[in-house]
Amino acid sequence: MSGATCNKGVCSKNTPSLSDAEIQEFLGSFPNWSLVQADDGSPRIHRTFVARNFMAAMNFLNSAANIAEELGHHPDLHLTEYRKVKVVVWTHAIRGLAKADFELAGKLDQVEVDYSPKWLKTNQKA
């Protein structure tokens, strides 16, 4: 996705927020991601999965960290129960979603993940 509005992490309060319709349109291209509302009401997108083991989860998280640094746009990364991964993306400066969030989601979707076979059986879209 080109045309993201944050350059090397330089998002500002002037970064355009996506409308609800635009968010839904983008989400249609990102089947691994869901829209959530934060406690403060701001929209965010998130992705969850269960990796095969701890090292598979850490490999994804390390790749995600490298991508985030490259883009200058950093998601919240969570690891629980040693292999459950949750990624939450939004633009902090605008307390909402911008094109850059979907650019980051697209790059994270390109990371190869060694999923739990049991989890994968019920989550074919991954």
Image (cartoon, rainbow, N blue to C red):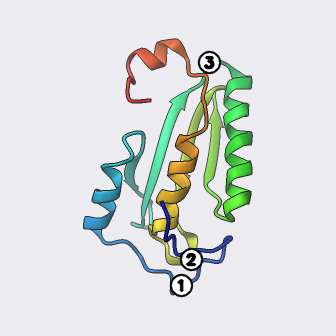
Q: Residue at x 38, y 19 (%)?
A: 122
Q: Residue at x 61, y 55 (%)?
A: 75
Say the numbered circle drawn on residue 55.
none
Marks 1,2: beta carbons within 8 A? yes
Question: What percent of the width, then of the height, locates residue 9?
Answer: 67, 71
SS type, badge 2: helix
Determine whether, in the image, residue 9 is placed left or right of residue 18. Answer: right
* Of callouts 2 and 3, the N-terminal one: 3
Q: CA distance from mark 2 to mark 3?
A: 35 Å
- State the quadrant of the C terminus: top left
Question: What percent of the width, then of the height, locates residue 65?
Answer: 72, 49
Q: Residues within 10 Å of mark 2 (few under 14, many from 20)?
A: few
Question: What percent of the width, then of the height, locates residue 41?
Answer: 39, 66
* Of callouts 1 and 2, the N-terminal one: 1
Q: Residue at x 45, y 70 (%)?
A: 96
Residue type at numbered disc 1: Lys
Q: CA distance from mark 1 to mark 3?
A: 39 Å
Q: CA distance from mark 1 to mark 2?
A: 5 Å
SS type, badge 1: loop
Q: Residues within 10 Å of mark 3 (few under 14, many from 20)?
A: some
